[in-house]
Amino acid sequence: MRFVRWAVLFFFLLHEGLWAQSPVRTIMTNRGKIFDFEVDEPNDALFLAHEYEAVSVVGLKSGAPRDLYLGFGGSVRCIGLSQRKDMLFAGGGDSAVFTFSLPELKRISRRNGHKNWVYDLVVDPRQDVVYSTGPDTLILLWDLLSSKPIDTLKGHKHWIWKLKFGPDPNQLYSSAGESELVRWNLEKGKIDVRFHGHLAAIFDIDVHPDGQMLASCSWDGTVRIWNVQTGNEIQLLTPRQLMQSVCWSPDGKFLILGDYSGNLYLYQVQGWKKIHQFQAHGGAIRKISFLKGSEGKYQVLTAGDDSRLKFWDFSAWLP
């Protein structure tokens, strides 16, 4: 009877997608939580933003340490690469945007303008213009020459957590506390679409590869899918956990979610069926990204509050 009970439990977990998974490999760090990361595959480099006031560079394939910068006055919450991969931008508890030259990770500037932390930054896909944001409700624009912001986007009333570009470089999405989620028309410098539905802060957003849908995750326990043109909600997913991160697959057929407790979820867009759910990290999953490996296969990269970056075989999750 005991064997039967274990067999029934095994098939239940397998059917529900709750069976434990093992990463392909793990990079462990000693600088606290990993808040953000960037991948430079041609140069075999992985850049990490750490809780304990550092940016590090490790080998993408080997995981071996290459460089470390410790000159921050607070946690590093966000990083971004220039279009030519020759500069790295970082922001966090210093209330400033730092610029580093690569590959030697040499600091070349510190730009002040925010009144509080820098929670996120993104690089314009058309040019090396950086957009940064945080609790001061402002989105500041920086070019490579200015020591002060060249422009400011105003429209949020609450702390801004995340910025994201979609396929259209004239459109920038931002999410904030108190359920604010908007799209900016950068040519006009103003908000042109608002998305209403969340009941709490929205900690991550991602635009579908075809540019027609937006996914957002919130501490209200939901993930919502939106029509980017109308602002209407298309689908509601209810993991009922504090949701932290979201990422579309490159082909747009799957959606991966991470929560504050370290659980990872995989949904199939067709029918919005949950395929997998398992404990991936020992703390919040701060970022999810895809890496194209050998033979066209993809790996999923996840960064967590357990000071680990994990590589997963995406094909092993597929039905």
Image: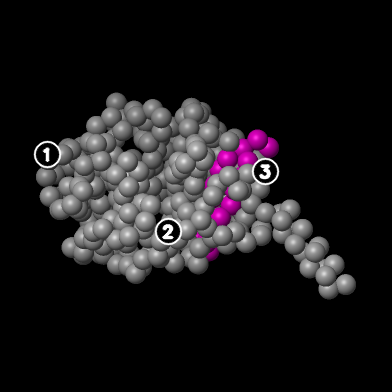
**Residue extending farthest right:** 1
Q: Nearer the viewer, residue 104 or 213?
A: 104
The residue lying furthest to the bottom in this view is 2
Q: Which residue is mark 3?
A: 319
> Is the C terminus in the top left, top right, bottom left or bottom right quadrant?
top right
Q: Is residue 88 visible?
A: yes
Q: Identity of the amino acid at label 1?
A: Leu
Q: Is residue 164 located in the magenta-colored stretch of the structure? A: no
Q: Quadrant of the N terminus?
A: bottom right
Q: Position of residue 60 (x, y in %)?
A: 36, 51
Q: Label 2 amino acid? A: Leu
Report the span colored magenta.
254-271
Q: Earlier in the sequence, mark 3 or mark 2?
A: 2
| Residue displayed at 21% across by 48% down | 103
Callout 3 crowding tier (Cα within 10 Å): few <14, some 14–19, many ≥20: few
Would you say residue 270 sits in the magenta stretch?
A: yes
Disc number for residue 309: 2
Mark 1 = which residue? 145
Which of labels 1 and 2 is toward the front?
A: 2
Nearer-the-camera pick, 235 or 23:
23
